[in-house]
Amino acid sequence: MTERNRTQTPDDGVDTPGQVRKTPRRGGGDPAGRGRTTIADGVVEKIAGLAARDVVGVHAMGSGISRTFGAVRDRVPGGSKSAARGVKAEVGEVQTALDLEIVVDYGVAIADVAGDVRENVIAAVERMTGLEVVEVNIAVSDVKLPEEEEDEPEPRIQ
């Protein structure tokens, strides 16, 4: 075989001078495509809950009863604040749908806050999980008035 032939047909199994031979990958295909990733509902709920709380005008997440029980649970030694309080997610293979229950601060435009929550939640969930968010339903369950005290019960000292 002449030098001219080797240069014209580099895929004939003969390396041309200065050429690095690529070996085929074993297993075939992209390594990222080998296997399946599943994301639990709770993971999506936590991401959405934290993203919703970041929006100005959102006072709390969840209904009054769930916040009261959550406050009690948070005070139990070893307990932790639930980032997913007020969020329900349905996660499929490639899509997710979310239901959020929020409490807004008095004086804010509820429609604007809901829109901002929706945008922030969709961006965070899609960026972190790769799932398509098909809907974010928002229920405003209460308005926090400036003179209201927190709904959290005071700790009992005995």
Image (spheres, rainbow, N blue to C red):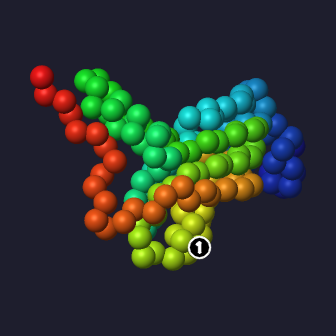
- Place of residue 13 in the rendered image (x, y in percent of width and height, measured from the top left): 82, 37
In front: 154, or 29? 154
Q: Is residue 146 above or below residue 95?
A: below
- Say which residue appears at 81% left-offset and 48% top-offset: 10
- Residue 54 visible, this angle: no
The total of numbered circles placed on residues is 1
Q: Check the image and report above or below for 146 versus 129.
A: below
On the rendered image, what quadrant is the C terminus found in?
top left
- Give the residue displayed 54% in from the left and 71% down from the top: 110
Instruction: Pick the quarter of the image with the N terminus.
Output: top right
Q: Secondary structure at mark 1?
A: helix
Which one is nearer the viewer's eye here, 121 or 66? Answer: 66
Q: Position of residue 92 (x, y in %)?
A: 75, 38
Identify the residue position indicated by label 1 in the image.
111
Q: Amino acid at mark 1?
A: Ala
Q: Left or right of 89: which side holds 43?
A: left
Does residue 12 show up? Answer: yes
Give left or right: position of 99 versus 55.
right
Q: Examine the image and state in which quarter residue 82 appears.
A: top left
The residue at the point 49 percent across, 58 percent down is: 142
Query: Viewer-proximal residue, 27 or 96?
Result: 96
Residue 150 position, x and y percent, is: 30, 52
